[in-house]
Image: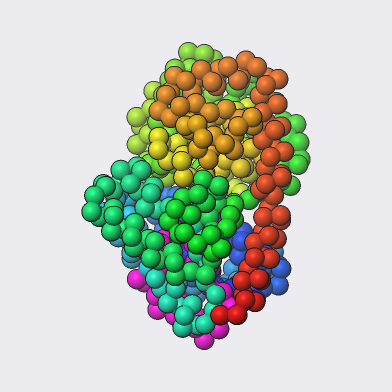
Amino acid sequence: MRILIYGLNFYPELTGVGKYTAELAAWLAFRGHEVRMVCAPPYYPDWALAKGYGNRRVRETWSANGTQIDVWRCPLLIPARPNGITRILHLISFAAASVPTLFGQLRWNPDMIFAIAPTLTCAPAAVAFSKLARCRSWLHIQDFELDAAFGTKLLKQGYLAKLAAALERLLLRGFDRVSTISDKMLERLREKLARAERIMLFPNWVDPDQFRRPVIESLYRREFGCANDDVLVLYSGSIGEKQGLEILLEAAEYLKGKSPFRFVICGEGPTKAGLAKRYSHLPNVAWKPLQPPERLGELLQSADIHALPQKAGLADFVMPSKLIGMMASGKPVIATAAPDTEIANVLDGRGQIVPPGDARALAEAIESLANDPARAAELGKAGRVYVEKHFHRDRVLEKFERELIELVRTPL
């Protein structure tokens, strides 16, 4: 098939949506499909252009898995300090700038346009393209942008919220298929789009082979300055408003007088500098940059405990992609989440949750788990088994490919 992927984020971004979009494109190309990509230059999670890239319209070729994928990059506004208004302008700028490049692909005559949200602002162009190209359209929702914006109070409720929700429902109805990444998000999608035959679960994935090699002596523990008996509490990923890392740092403050505990924050993002400065007095916290993807398995296996903080109100409809990597490492996860949210359901019997916003409870959970290595090992093993069953890369992507082929073969 000829598959045109249309989304904001792509390789060489190492976290979030860009990582999964690149892996999907490479996997499809390896399976023999022709894949093209329309995206922005890499900027996430630093909110700054990656080294070697300009903010301009350019065509390039990306080689992956012995295949080549044509990539068209389109300029966009990249705010230095993203907030509610600047984020909206950021998304609109890419949607507007990418329209000429997108419609230039009509001559290629694709079988499918696969659009990725964020950003939903690209949805009108994706639907219009599918009508003109007489091809199938698929929208994949990695994040409910509006729900997240109102949940974190980046945008305020009111008439604007009602208008945006109505427009969102209208856009969703324009696609032949709409998918999302978790059960709770699928429930939310059913509320927004009452056409069950058009929606499906398409979760993010992990390659368990990254974690099959046992780490006898982790180089990372040495690099992080951890003694053999230190308890390494690790957070690895984006550092922004949604992550709510303040609670983890406050937990570190509760435990700063207890020498075995060492907290390592690996990542980049718009709130990193401010948080590092605010909590610079903590001797048990180390800040590190994002690590190379080829060392992800070693990094995650170096931890004794993984921490997954989330702001209150977000865990209902957000499934952090980093969670499945944490679980695949075979090490226990402690997350902040309310009961019966997606995170809580995934970690039920396979990890531990504490109430959002309760730093003392998080600190106590970390200390309790560190003092019970048998339970920590049991939770880690259960998490690993669950991920292999539900989020194995090849199983997830083979199912997606079957759905894709069936949809393309269905007459328009």
Residue 96: percent from left, percent from top: 34, 71
Magenta span: helix, strand or loop, mainly?
A: helix
Pick the quarter of the image with the C terminus: bottom right
Give residue 67's quadrant in the image. bottom right
Asked if residue 115 is among those painted magenta in the image, a careful observer would answer yes
For image coordinates 65% across by 77% down, the residue present is: 409
Residue 339: percent from left, percent from top: 50, 31
| In the rendered image, the vertical position of residue 152 relative to residue 44, given as above or below | above
Camera-nearest residue between 18 and 6: 6
Camera-nearest residue between 12 and 153: 153
Q: Is residue 157 left or right of residue 272?
A: left
Q: Residue furthest left?
A: 159
Pick the quarter of the image with the N terminus: bottom right
For image coordinates 61% across by 59% down, the residue present is: 23
For image coordinates 59% across by 47% down, the residue present is: 292
| In the rendered image, the vertical position of residue 412 relative to residue 276, given as above or below | below
Give residue 2's quadrant in the image. bottom right
Asked if residue 210 is among those painted magenta in the image, a careful observer would answer no
**What colour scheme was applied to this rendering of the protein?**
rainbow
Region in magenta: 96-123
Residue 9 visible in the snapshot:
no
Residue 327: percent from left, percent from top: 64, 37
Q: Is residue 412 left or right of residue 152?
A: right
